[in-house]
Amino acid sequence: MKTGKFLTTVLAATLMALQPTSCNPKLNIEPVKPVTPTTDPNGDEGDETIDLPTEPASCTNKIVAHRGGSSECGAPDNSRTSLKYAMGLKCYAMECDIYWTKDNDIVVAHATDTYFINNLKPWEHTLEELRKAGKLSNGEELPSLTEFLDIVQVEGNCTKLCLDIKNLDGTLTDYPIKAVQRACEIIAARKAEKFCEFICTSNTAVAAAAAVCQTKYGIPVGWMSNSEPHVHLSKGFTWANLSTVYIEPYGTHATQRTIDQYLNAGMEFSVYNVDKQKGDGNAAYSDEAVAYFVSRYKDLRCICTNYPKWLLSKVQ
């Protein structure tokens, strides 16, 4: 990989990742090994490449920090600061939302009203235009997927990116399909497949595209459909990622499933969100519900939460 803009971006982002953050509580992120430029034997004289780690360090937990645990640390969701908070806790992963932009980039952000970012539709605007329309509440610019990879793809880091392929609505499936396809291209170019996973909207058209990408790039995809296991398997998914509202015995939806339905079918299963207090509509937060999901921790692929430090204390 040639030096130039990419080299500058990676080195700058690596240095930024080592800086203390203002997130509360205070972070204690261990120093990471800086990326070292090496000579490219196949390139022209003077050209350099960067050797990036191709897999994360070993992780000892299954906790996914929803939007980086922004509800717990006070940083904006999907921000660099919240990502570094999750990394400081050594979470298994940070969940973050991705969208395709008009200039064929991937922005990491939580859209409002389904798909507006800074009051703009991302597929109608470039990343730069989205950034010019507003900053995060802590002054950060909207991050791109590449910049998030710059932060996590370093020696000693165990925290992956769990990339949420958001549904826009039933008529705009082209854009989430482009989001997963372009994200995979960016990830593969950096050989960062083991640093990333996807969770995918239940929309069947988007899911079909994600299943193809899963096979092509070898990046796991958890399908967020409240369907029976055989439906998941028929579409190529061996990992189901469901909201707590669908899961017995504490679910609230009319159609409920059990964890064992999926495990007995040979599938992996994960859940979102197990929280310490009422929050988003997917949260299980009663003492009884929290105790149940903690009791099933060993059976789960991972558990997503808005309060990763709190949940880590429950399972460790």
Image: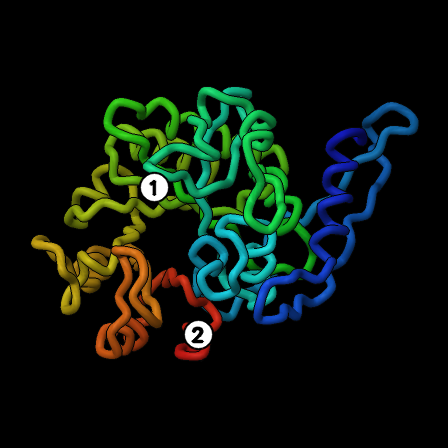
- Number of numbered discs: 2
Residue ID at (86%, 29%): 47
Q: In the rendered image, which residue does mark 2 sit on?
A: 310
Residue 51, percent across and down? 74, 44
Report the amino acid beneath label 1: Cys
Residue 311, percent across and down? 41, 72
Residue ID at (28%, 51%): 240
Question: Which label lies toward us, 1 or 2?
Answer: 2
Quarter of the figure with the N terminus: top right
Q: Secondary structure at mark 2?
A: helix
> Cβ–Cβ below 8 Å for labels 1 and 2?
no
From the viewer's perspective, tell me whether residue 186 is left or right of residue 122: right
**Gap between marks 1 and 2, in whole Å?**
26 Å
Residue 165 sits in which quadrant? top left
Residue 5 in view, yes or no: yes
Query: Could you say which is closer to the camera, residue 235 or residue 115?
Result: 115
Neighbor class of circle 2 (other Cα within 10 Å; few <14, some 14-19, many 20+) is few
> In the drawing, what numbered circle is on residue 200?
1
Between discs 1 and 2, the one toward the N terminus: 1
> In the drawing, what numbered circle is on residue 169?
none
Report the amino acid beneath label 2: Trp
